[in-house]
Amino acid sequence: MVPIASTAIAGRRRVFRLSRRMNLIAGAVIIGLLVAVALLSLVWTPLPPAKMQIIHKLQPPLAFGLLGTDQFGHDVLSMLMAGCWNSLSIAITAVTIGGTLGSIAGISAAAIRGPFEALLMRICDVIFALPPILSAMVLGAFLGPGRFTAITAIAVFMIPVFARVTLATSLQAWSRDYVTAARAIGNTRLTISLRHVLPNIISQIIVHGAIQLGLAILTEAGLSFLGLGMAPPAPTWGRMLADAQTYLALAPWLAILPGLAIALTVFGFNMLGDGLRDLLDPREASR
């Protein structure tokens, strides 16, 4: 019975490891294709995304162009490709800025502790109390809608997210024996943070960043839907959804296609984040 049980356990472990690899591969393939489309849109689209052809408005897929046209005669495929670049560039920029500032704050709070740590947590609580959509509305009132407003609103919300995660993981690192040894030989807190704490938590920051990119894509789409994203005629998936509301019965593809693009992107980033977590987490790798 023991060999049979051992074989069954080994088989389950192989299936589990395969599923983890499939998550990573699937996420990487999806995001890789989307990035390729976004980069391609900078140099080529079937038609200029802003080109209006009123005579061909509301044409269904394959009737005029691969994915049809909208109410102004814009080529939907070209708008989706250009919107891919706009959505990804805003999300990646915002998460990079917010993740960098939040990680610096979290690592610093773990090293300094005391009142600085308490103050950082209270600031995080205040920012969490204001959803990014509401923050963008306030910023939009002062700055006007645009790329900068969307990036700022998302980045401000990402700072406390990364700060909390980085603080928690940094505190765990500070309790390890290698940090105790580094302190015993006289290393400063800055040296310990850079040489010992950061290298041991960077994988968790990367994984968290990949997952947060999916949330950033959703937030950017919501801001564009409300008119707080990039200004026309620059296409975004969120504004395509907003413009399609009036034509749901007449031209449902105008809402379905950008909706699918958003869902696929979020799904890809979530799969990529899960796969990276399983790959980089030593506790998962030992299973």
Image: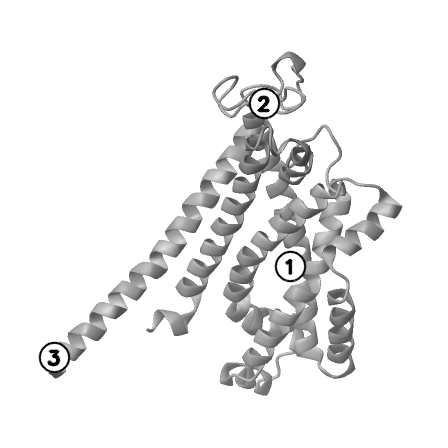
Q: Nearer the viewer, residue 186 or 145?
A: 145
Residue at coordinates 60% horizontally, 76% vertically from top-left?
168
Residue at coordinates 70% horizontally, 42% vertically from top-left?
225
- Work out which quarter of the rendered image holds the N terminus and state it: bottom left
Residue 234: quarter of image: top right
Q: Nearer the viewer, residue 264 or 162?
A: 264
Q: Determine the residue located farthest toward the front in the rendered image.
A: 249
Q: Would you name the residue on which mark 3 appears? A: 3
Q: Secondary structure at mark 3?
A: helix
Nearest to viewer (mark 3 / mark 1): 3
Return the disc, 3 or 1, that comes first in the chain's sequence: 3
Q: Secondary structure at mark 1?
A: helix
Q: Would you name the residue on which mark 2 appears? A: 69
Q: Secondary structure at mark 2?
A: loop
Measure how far apart labels 3 and 2 are at the Cα level.
63 Å
For the question of whether residue 184 can be seen, the reply is yes
Tell me if label 3 and label 2 are in contact, CB under 8 Å: no
Q: Nearer the viewer, residue 264 or 124?
A: 264
Q: Amino acid at mark 1?
A: Gly
Q: Position of residue 268 (x, y in %)?
A: 48, 49
> Is residue 164 positioned above or below 39 on the image?
below
Q: Residues within 10 Å of mark 2 (few under 14, many from 20)?
A: many
Q: Amino acid at mark 2?
A: Thr
